[in-house]
Image: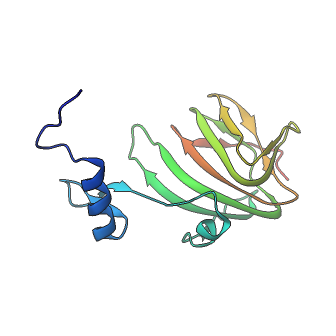
Amino acid sequence: MPTQSRNTLSPHEIELRLSLSGGSMVSQDSRRPAATVMRDLLAAESQDAVAWKEWSEPGRAGVQMHVLYATEPPQEAVAFLVRYSPGAHGDLHRHLGYELMFVLAGEMVTGKGALYRTGDLVIEAPGSVHQITTETGFTVLAVREAPTVPMTGAR
């Protein structure tokens, strides 16, 4: 059975520190939390409680986002929650790195007509091109390891 060093917190200690701090543990680098916890994110009520911001870009309409983290160059990774309202669409873009999307709610459609529903996990490869749309609306957890490049030909 593995032993814990003095610098390792037990699951109970982590839970206690999270509850005392309102959901975030502060790392030794006090500028950012060591952990952020969003509970029951599959529930509509939890998704509604997120601090959403309008995502305004050319070719994008009806989309909100909540950034979970973003890193600085040279490796510009970002994780975020994205919410598309019914009838919304994103911009046509090419991926410079991998993108992982986990559908938390609703139905997401790619420009190639592929339909993804709640519980589906989609991984786009570097160089892939797509435009996301929806008739019903959806929410995803997205993680990009690199930025995207806008393409022409979007809506």
Measuring from the top left, give residue 136's x and y in whole percent.
85, 60
Q: What colour scheme governs how the chains and residues are painted in the rendered image of this protein?
A: rainbow
Comparing 9 with 121, the one in front is: 9
Measuring from the top left, give residue 92's x and y in whole percent.
76, 45
Q: Residue at x 47, y 56 (%)?
A: 68
**Rendered position, 124 above or below 143:** above
Measuring from the top left, give residue 9's x and y in whole percent.
22, 47
- Tell me the quarter of the picture where residue 22 sits: bottom left
Decide if residue 52 is on the left or right side of residue 6.
right
Question: Residue most toward the front?
Answer: 1
**Rendered position, 78 above or below 82:** above
Number of numbered discs visible in the structure rendering:
0
Question: Residue most toward the left?
Answer: 6
Q: Residue at x 82, y 49 (%)?
A: 154
Q: Residue at x 58, y 32 (%)?
A: 98
Decide if residue 155 is on the left or right side of residue 9.
right
Decide if residue 126 is on the left or right side of residue 72.
right
Measuring from the top left, give residue 134's x and y in whole percent.
83, 55
Comparing 56 with 118, the one in front is: 118
- Tell me the quarter of the picture where residue 137 sits: bottom right
Q: Residue at x 17, y 37 (%)?
A: 4
Look at the image and tell me in which quarter the N terminus lies.
top left
**Rendered position, 43 above or below 152:** below
Comparing 63 with 122, the one in front is: 122
